[in-house]
Amino acid sequence: MNSDMRESGSEQMPEFSESYSDLLCSDLTVTEQRSLIFQVLYAVDAFDYEVSLESIVDNLSRGFGVIIPQDSTVFKTALAVSSERAVLDVQITPLIENWRFDRLGVATKLILRFAVWELQHSSTDAAVIINEAVELAKCFAEKDAYKFINGILDEFLKSRGIEKDSVS
């Protein structure tokens, strides 16, 4: 397996390594930026939101060799998702039948928050956002969590009056 890739089943997602040394995050593909945003969100959550986003981003920038300026989409999105997590959780919770939100795996929870935030604040097509969330889940979340995430995001769209067929 290539050291720049993490494999989960047949899916691959880039990991950030020395090959990205001193690269601006804006030079990454949108998919790579989403992966980086997820990793920032994961680190913030791991520190129970008690360590500043600036400090976490600084450490991740040095570790990945990717420069993440505070005016970048990566930083702004991670800040917005982490700041709005309580509101996002309230929006997601009714969609999860027979589950308690606090029982979801960390990666699943973060991917759902990120995708729901993006569905509400981005001009990106909903089908693309859902597909990217599914791909993140295949790489970083629990086995088969991608199916759960796909279903919850589909329900979110329906709750907003948007049929999945209209965004595919």
Image (cartoon, helix red, strand yellow):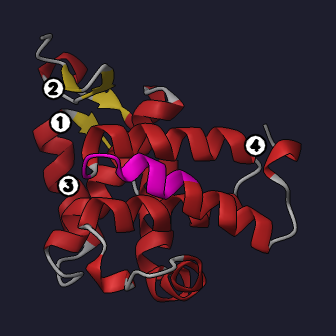
Is label 2 in contact with label 4 (beta carbons under 8 Å)? no
93 is higher (above) or lower (below) than 167 = below
Q: What mark, if any, has residue 125 been given in the picture?
A: 4
Extreme-top residue of the structure: 2
Mark 2 vs mark 3: in front: 2
- Tell me if residue 104 can be seen: yes
**Residue displayed at 42% across by 47% down:** 146
**Disc 3 to disc 1, how far (Cα)?**
10 Å
Residue drawn at (75%, 43%) of the image: 125
Residue linked to disc 1: 64
Whichever of callouts 2 and 1 sits on the residue coming sooner in the sequence is 2
Q: Which residue is mark 2?
A: 17
Say if the magenta span includes residue 91.
no
Residue at far front of view: 98
Mark 3 or mark 1: whose residue is earlier in sequence: 3
Tag 3's secondary structure? helix
- The answer to whether mark 2 and mark 1 are in CB contact below 8 A is yes
Q: Residue at x 52, y 33 (%)?
A: 30
Q: Residues within 10 Å of mark 4 (few under 14, many from 20)?
A: few
Q: Which of the two labelled residues, at mark 4 and mark 3, occupies the earlier sequence position?
A: 3
| Mark found first going from the N terminus, 2 or 3 | 2
- Dot label at residue 58: 3
The amino acid marked with disc number 1 is Phe
Range drawn in magenta: 142-150
Q: Amino acid at mark 2?
A: Ser
Q: Secondary structure at mark 1?
A: helix
